[in-house]
Image (tube, rainbow, N blue to C red):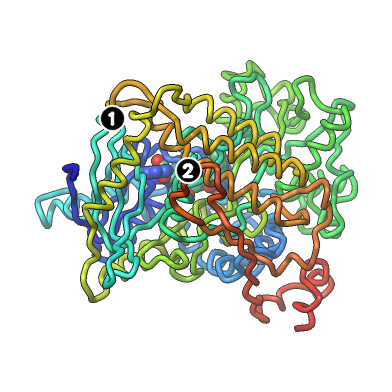
Amino acid sequence: MAHVERQQWDVVVVGAGGAGLRAAIEAREQGARTAVICKSLFGKAHTVMAEGGIAASLGNVNEGDNWQVHFRDTMRGGKFLNQWRMAELHAKEAPDRVWELETWGALFDRTPDGRISQRNFGGHEYPRLAHVGDRTGLELIRTLQQKVVALQQEDFARYGDHEARLRVFQECTVTRVLKDRGPAGGQRVSGTFCYERETGRFFVLEAPAVVLATGGIGKSFKTTSNSWEYTGDGHALALLAGAPLLNMEFVQFHPTGMVWPPSVKGILVTESVRGDGGVLRNSEGRRFMFDYVPDVFKEKYAESQEEGDRWYEDPDHNRRPPELLPRDEVARAINAEVKAGRGSPHGGVFLDVSTRMPAERIRRRLPSMYHQFKELADVDITAEPMEVGPTCHYVMGGIAVDSETAAAVGVPGLFAAGEVAGGMHGSNRLGGNSLSDLLVFGRRAGLHAARHAAAPGTRPAVSGREVDAAAAEALAPFHAAEGAENPYTLHQELQTAMNDLVGIIRRGAEMAEALERLAALRVRASRAGVEGHRQFNPGWHLALDLRNMLLVAECVARAALERTESRGGHTREDCPAMERDWRPVNLLCRPVDPAPADPGAARIALERIRTEPIRPDLLALFEKEELAKYLAEEELHG
Ligand code: FAD
């Protein structure tokens, strides 16, 4: 048996983005001894990159806003596939979570009369995003980190040890959620198997409750706004522990990523650019979004440029411009313009603020965008338009969870929050709804994980056999036979297959081909090999991440092939309509044989389940005619 250090905690939180930190703070405040573990440096999670803001119906800029309007917008954005109780809790609790951040020291931009300022974003009826310039995620993480430090100082005063009840393990990766498989344990969570990236040292964090808050999956696609960490680890860890994933076909392609130069392709251009007045034009100079307003949104969006422009000054008497449609609609429109030969020189379209706002205002409202384009593309956005195109940005699918407790379905002791959890956003997320989701469900996950850990009963045990198996799995890339496969090559091929065959516009035959390519890649990945040793070895780390990316990619491709309609972040050229009969259907990805003899064999089985009927008082928030556009016949009359 390998000697692996073990530590005992009550709650282990995997991930130190907004969801993980909010969960950890809550668990610690509930009295649980809490460990947080993150793959990158503490403070460098994806959340830091969030630019636009946090959606919460504070009603500071338009008093008409309230949780019901926010709920309605969220359900419309998700094309009614949202786990409605999550959308309700989110809309109700987001304002409290923003206020709480302020009491912890967050410095939001203000309205002239001193309230937290709120900006417009796609799909939100009122200005709703609390923001800090275009660096909101940075302020969110800074504030949560400050709160962690404050709690650690309290613990030092009481126990003489800053890390007595809340400890952060940074630059450490979890490769397995461990389970007590004994007859008494009955498959409960028992901890995590981890390695330190710098030294390669293995260790185990034993705990009866584990919260997964690992973020997204973007690195499975070639063009993405996501950074190196987003390899779908939490999704895969849950699957391998026996928890199903929900609706993995829904992947958001943000309409505006940089398209040039190639080295920065995919980097995000925040939606705030459009929220603040930026417009999209094609190579003929036409504001083409007016040509792409779908029927379900027609009543809510301006029909002329003049009306759209008036809305910025007088939103109560005008309809919003169609540049602010939900992201899936804008991304598809850009794709269609480029395909029709009306794109920009580098295969995108033009996004212009330079003719819409004075230079000084652009630099003040969008400082990061100004610097991003100046430094990376040598474009001065105060004087010329940006070139933009769709980029893989966010995954709506994720671990199937209980709406109230964030408990993962079927695995006692496992919780999930943030981007890794499914359900909240339905088939398409509205901008700004992620940061609020992290805070609302991060808190809930921390609360219920702490309660679970404090429940009476024996602590689950971590068996030596399971630790040995996890260590052997992690070391396998060092023992690859002759003719080992290069993990970087495999990763590139995976990204190309997903981008080209399961990307923004999908076709049945291409997705079937993607599944074949993924099977072949699984066979080759079983021979992935690396050289050198365990001290900081990025090739080894990637070889381990490949297992996760391949599992997640298979989920996305299988679910996307199964859902024969177009809805939100799932667009099929061969099934272009949104079908009402698919509205009450959720697709669950379940793991099949965890260690098949044939590495190419399918690892995922799909199951169709019915969505829970939407509560009548929530349905009553919508007009009957609107519901008739979305709900299946039996739901309308049931
Ligand atoms: P993350 O912040 O992604 O953190 C994941 C954590 O998990 C990290 O600490 C990582 O190191 C860790 N981790 C991952 N795998 C492992 C492992 N195996 N072991 C240990 N640790 C692991 N949303 C909004 O609402 N508003 C915005 O304005 C906005 N702007 C955005 C701009 C950009 C450029 C991007 C990319 C996204 C934006 N989003 C925005 C989306 C939002 O930022 C993310 O969805 C959100 O931050 C995800 O937070 P999270 O806590 O779930 O995970």
Occupied quadrant, residue 319: bottom right
Q: Along the horizontal axis of the image, is 85 left or right of 176?
A: right
Q: Amino acid at mark 2?
A: Asn
The three-letter amino acid code for the residue at tag 1 is Glu
Asked whether mark 2 lies closer than 8 Å to ligand 1, one says: yes
Residue 20 tag number? none
Q: Position of residue 6 (x, y in %)?
A: 18, 49
Farthest top residue?
Answer: 378
Q: Give the secondary structure at mark 2.
A: helix
Is 287 left, or right, of 560 in this rendering?
right
Q: Position of residue 464 (x, y in %)?
A: 21, 52
Q: Residue furthest left?
A: 160
What residue did someone put label 1 on?
198
| Residue 394 horizontal/vertical position (percent) | 59, 45
Report, in whole angstroms, how far the alpha carbon at label 1 lies from the one at label 2.
21 Å
Look at mark 2 in the image and give the residue it sits on. 548
Assess mark 1: CB under 8 A from ligand 1? no
